[in-house]
Image: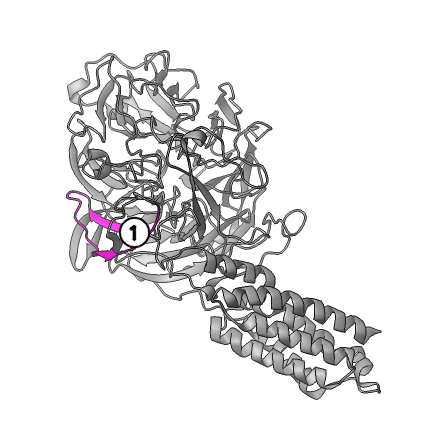
Amino acid sequence: MLTKLTSVVFAVLGVALLVMGGQLLFAGGSPFYALMGLGLLITAYLLLKKRPVALSFYAVLMWITVVWIIWEVGFDKWQWIPRGDVFGVLGLWLALPWTVRALTGNARRFHPFLGTTVALMIALVIGLCFYDPVPQEGTINNARVSSGSDVAAQDWTAYGGTSNGQRFSALNQITKDNVKDLEVAWSYHTGDVRKEGDASEYTFEATPLKANGMLYLCTPHNEIHALDPETGAVKWKHTPPKDRSYLQQHQTCRGVSYFDSAAAQTAANASQEPALCRKRIFNATTDAQLIALDADTGKACTDFGTNGVVDLHANMGEVRPHALMQTAAPLVAGKLVIVGGSVMDNGFNSGNPSGVIRAYDAVTGRLVWNFDPANPEQTQPIAADKNYPYDTPVAWGTLSADLKNGLVYVPFGNASPDELGIERDANSNTEKFRDALVALDLNTGAFKWRYQSSNHDLWDRDNPSQPSLLDIDYQGKKQPVVVLPTKTGNLFVLNRLTGEPVYPVNQVPVSTEGGVLGEKFAPTQPVSSLNFIPQPLTEKSMWGITPFDQMACRLDFKSLRYDGNPWTPATEQGAIIFPGNIGVFNWGSVAVDPERQLLIASPVRLAYKYTLIKRTPETATERKFTKDGQPYWNENFHGDYAIHIQQLASSLGIPCIAPPWGRLVGVDLKTGKTEWLRRVGTTKNLNTTFLPGRFPIGFPMGMVAHGGPLATAGDVVFHGATADNFFRAYDSTTGKLLWETELEAGAQATPSTFMGKDGKQYVVIAAGGHGSLGTKDGDSVVAFRLK
């Protein structure tokens, strides 16, 4: 009976493998699974006939499988899983004493060939547990030398520490030797939690500021909380009405900004009337308001704009509901508060709000200058009865400023619709500023230079990251640089005064054929010598947890267009875009240590499937829905095509590409060389579709990390962001993991650090989850200090 049941199992699996493997074979894929299906069917027949040779035959199949696995993926244990797990379990079952005895019909309990094979396979798998081909060992030996630049120290007064966007602190009380002794100093719950009706992209991504003796942060609904930095006790709260609308594309606030009018005062304006609020907190909201609050009390600074509010809808013309929003912290630079903006991606083909950059007087709210990508020479404030042109590139990330040289750096992205260029004018100003880092005069908004990070972007390759400013000694020459991380994976290192590349950049030929009728493609794309552009995918790159979901991914790979580079044209039949619109780098940006001239980054590896859906005059305003009845977000009403974007994943919801999906890297900026690389994050708390609840085991595969790192002069890198709810500390010299702790929810945020009045260095992070990543929701802010 046991032999017959075993035979049935082998036969069922064999048929399934033969059918799916045959489909893959006819699609031009690997023949292994079809041949293995035949092998299982032969084994099933031999078992049914009670032929002992079935055991030896299956042992041969196991050795063939191992040789094939090594040929395809080497000794990466995570890639062995879908290729060998099922076949290994079947071999183990056949080698068990009762199976051997039932088949041979005597007291024999061990089959020498199969038993030895299984034992060797088990030993091999155990050995693989201690080997990982992905991490790159190395050391950044640069000595710490004072940079002379403006760096965060006692306080954390801007989103990136200071206006230069370094995400670095000169504090060194917490070091790589004592970071293991960190403990929770306090934990605070904002009370602003996701409820029915809120956007699916509901995220707590705030980086707390430490200034004016308080800690300031914002919540997804733009509440502002001021806390005691040493205890977490509430000093004051600003709680505006909540607009819970699922139509909101992004419900987030990544940070607030701090302004001290006394610090910005100069001899030239010393005679001016003092501001009502000498110290201010600025917040740019998801409903496009710029508000100013008294940093001491939380009350509105009524001399700013209209009763403390500047309406950012002004001069925008007609704006559709939820089409204009702010998700990034405004930039405070000198006497100005400067904002970009965000629009609803691919909602409508035209009539999308302008991507104008506006600088306001931080005291009065008066518009000082505006930089409109459609009219870059006209920086004087727009007339009250005029509107900025629609459909220009937007800068939705945080801006940076070089106060010494009087420059503002604007990371422009694409203009909606992001994935279509049929109606674009190649000679327009709009096209010139698409995906461009732009340097402007801080005081006037006058254009200084631009550098285009992507040519004729058709993939949503926005510049999402805050640029980082520092001076480096590259090839023996001291240079002032700006580092721009991009979604493609490039890290452009440019002279921040001229925009000229410091690290070499090559224009590489890319796909120009195919796509949809009328679409044109740039013949080349820029590739920096410092980049984390993922290696091209092949069928062997496909992954899963069983042979069956891996075969499904292989079939997807064979059926979709993929040209082996990040610039594959999207089609109506579907195309693989790798990296996809989440990018290699996103809003979390990078951390740079200006004193040791090193860079820490957390590049992501995820592939996406882009499918263009033809619109007709009859379907111009028709909503498009998925098979399960959910509406597409990228509908592009009145356009030529709607856009369906989905992660390249199996039916189990697991990425089709093998891990790591998230890494942490250390780069020596003196040489441009990546010195160390680590997987970052585990599978613990992963929201799965194939198991109820969250995955309980933390396999260190390397998970997606959405959020940025923090570097300190203690040679420590702090990093949350991973999809496993953990907060970790690493050695910035070697990348070695030094400390970790599990938080209440996903920490898709960038941490900050400051010195408390008690003489203790604190590190603080928001942990509230991320709607799109599926991490656990929450509302906590957690501070750590040494015991």
Asked whether 390 or 727 is in front, the reply is 390
Please give the name of the residue rendered at 58% of the width and 74% of the height, measured from the top-left corner. Answer: 35
Please give the name of the residue rendered at 28% of the width and 37% of the height, measured from the top-left corner. Answer: 412
Q: Is residue 481 above or below residue 355?
A: below
Please give the name of the residue rendered at 43% of the width and 54% of the height, measured from the top-left corner. Answer: 605
Residue 737 seen in the figure: no
Q: Is residue 136 above or below residue 325?
A: below
Side of 26 relative to 440 (left or right): right
Q: Is residue 618 above or below residue 122?
A: above
Q: Position of residue 746 (x, y in %)?
A: 54, 43
Q: Main secondary structure of the magenta part?
A: loop
Q: Which residue is mark 1?
A: 491
Q: Which corner quadrant of the image does residue 16 belong to? A: bottom right
Residue 507 colored magenta? yes
Q: Position of residue 11 (x, y in %)?
A: 71, 70
Asked whether 334 or 82 is in front, the reply is 82
Residue stretch in magenta: 491-516
Side of 271 relative to 299 (left or right): left
Q: Position of residue 134 (x, y in %)?
A: 44, 65
Residue 275 colored magenta? no
Please give the name of the residue rendered at 34% of the width and 40% of the height, measured from the top-left corner. Answer: 420
Side of 530 relative to 90 (left or right): left
